[in-house]
Image: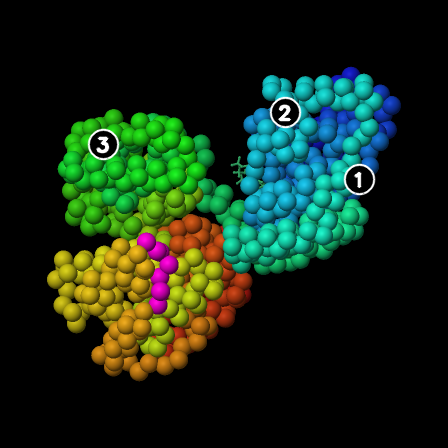
Amino acid sequence: MKGTVHYELRDNIALMTIDNPPVNPLSSGVRQGLTDGITQALADDNVAAIVLTGAGRAFIAGADISEFGGAAEGPSLHDCLTAMDDASKPIIAAINGTAFGGGLEVALCCHYRVIAPSAPVGLPEVKLGLLPGAGGTQRLPRLIGAAKALDFILSGDPIPGPVALELGIADEVAEGDIVEAGIAFAQRIVAAGSPIRRIRDESDKLLEDRGNAELFDQARKNSARRMRKRFAPEMIIQCIEAAVNLGDFDAGMKVEGECFAQCMKHPQREALIHTFFSEREVAKIPDVPRDTPTQDIQQAGVIGCGTMGGGITMSFLNVGIPVTVLELDQEALDRGIGVIKRNYDIQVKRGRMSETEVDQRMAILTGTTQYEDLGSADVIIEAVYENIDVKVETFKKIEAIAKPGAILASNTSGLDVDKMGDATSRPESVIGLHFFSPANVMKLLEVVRGSKTSKETIATSMKLGKRLNKIAVLSGNAPGFIGNRMLAGYTRQAGEIILQGATPYQVDNALLKFGMPMGPFQMNDLVGLDLGWRARQLAGVNPEDVPITARVADKLCNMERFGQKTNRGYYIYPEGSRAGQADPEVIELVEQTSAELGITRREIADEEVLKRCLYPLINEGARILEDGIAIRPCDIDIVYINGYGFPEVTGGPMFWADQQGLDNILADIKKFQEEYGGDIWKPAPLLEKLVSEGKTFASLQS
Ligand code: 3H9
């Protein structure tokens, strides 16, 4: 059994300490230990009260989610909690650190709660496609009222100790030694002969909202907006509604049990737990052990203060790392720094940041036009024009001024990191750090290892990613890395489909319904249609050599419709709005382009749109695994969820593919190969192998 609970006597108080490193989830051994400890304390006449705490940095991180779906050993959590709730001696939770999910539910089963100021408490189950299924949906509304419980459980966000006290979740905030504070609290309770407070028996707060249908309607509306396509929020609302309207605790627990079971069976639950573990798995690199030495990053240099450079700079400033940002001339520098300041001011206006915080960030930002000023930086990231010759020249300049051992990074989105490394005499220090736009917001950081990049450089970069509050995923060095290599097929298919009969709006809507935050044409409008058009013009590509899937975009650019930046692209954007409107002129342009190319247009079903856009991701993903560019399928999932908006509730493209059945996907890919031909529909050998062996991508995980 996993985990244990230490039991000791401190005078007349039984101290139980949960020990299941690193974060004390409620694994089988912990449940057993809790049950045994309570039994022992109740049987011992010398024990007047029980104090429960956690060893290390957490109180309890929740149920052990790695146990879900498997055969459960030891006592159930419910039996364990009932024993605590029914105990004839007071139990005091001394919340030393994180109390999440089942961990907070354990604390709510205790009769009193003393909390450390820094200890976060939360019920984050909704983020895993679940609900607090150990009485949380019934006890919390009894303690803090239904409205606050709805907000707390539906957001899943943690709150610190003092806020827990304010809300009524904790009875006391204790500075210093939390165990001593818990014991002192217990002794006071015993000395005063205070009655045991069982939340299950309270109902005053519930009565305030009995029959208040408006409260639950509003919660439904809010969660439909904030948690689009999620199954768990409705289940949570039903449980709290039951707590309020049924009144009887056991009847409410029955509803909670049924709703929890529905969540457990739902594919979203499996997908979201896959995502949770994958986000942690991607940090593990087989040939770069955890104890690989890393460098301390105290100062950063960023080259270029345009959209990407500015966003990267903000990512560092936001975590307190001073940045020197370089631009070619003073005018561009002033403009770039001005944009950074304006972005922060917007945050202040929206109430997300204080003026003081902005001042603190701006105070650690230095602008320069001289490369020498980057000489003391521990990491230098170039965010110059995406062209290999420009990048190589930039790396020569960086190498001339960078201090020995500094990390020399490129923000390239797909160019050869080795070519940049070879432009220097220290390719071991050169690495790709591919941020996603807007870089200060997007969670993904693709870390690209060149063939000579050292393990120290990789380990430092992965650690830096975490410090910047990003999820860093390691990619091999091949054109487009993981994300953009896969994206190429997706956007090309979207381009083909509109020439064959769909409109850009149909394609976008089909993908929106699937759960993408925006469709491929909305994305093109956001990024700017002119990027590809300008690159083709610079390269002198003849109009007849322009790929057919870029023809419509180029025509739009010839009409100066560059996308959102000009308020027109595939969509029309009314002044000041980012919500595009369909434009009949664009449909005409698409139809005209089909005619010019001799393509007969036909009805295309949304299902075909989806398959043709999404299956190239899977097929290319399989090739990326074969080539060793991504370490595991979950690395691809995390790239796609965090960098490209692939719906989190699907678990990412590779996990989703397993759930669809790889045999079904392969059969469709073969059908598309017959119909449309081209490399894109050549089945990846790995996909064929997995199907022939009856295996899934998940089988490659270990
Ligand atoms: C629940 O409670 C349901 C109940 O309501 C009803 C039941 C009937 N289980 O994140 P870290 C592992 S649902 C198993 O890197 P940090 C994690 O995988 C649960 N393992 O550390 C990692 O393993 P490894 C509700 C868990 O300090 C290691 O611990 N609770 C669990 O950055 C360290 O994790 C949650 O949703 C778990 N519950 O952050 C809380 N939690 O080292 C989920 C962690 O092998 N957990 N692990 O990669 C968290 O939010 C963060 O892990 C926490 C620590 C904030 C606790």
The stretch in magenta equals 576-582
The kind of residue tagged 1 is: Asp
Magenta stretch encompasses residue 578: yes
Left or right: where does residue 247 sit relative to residue 267? right
Quarter of the rendering containing residue 393: top left
User: What residue is disc 3 on?
Assistant: 367
**Residue most extreme to the top:** 11
User: What residue is disc 2 on?
Assistant: 173
Quarter of the rendering containing residue 584: bottom left
Residue 289 location, x and y as percent? Answer: 44, 36
- CB atoms of marks 1 and 2 within 8 Å: no
Name the image quarter holding the N terminus: top right
User: What residue is disc 1 on?
Assistant: 201
Left or right: where does residue 355 sit relative to residue 81? left
Of the image marks 3 and 2, the number of the one nearer the N terminus = 2
Q: Tag 1's secondary structure?
A: helix
Q: Main secondary structure of the magenta part?
A: loop
Badge 3 density bin: few <14, some 14–19, many ≥20, Cα 10 Å? some
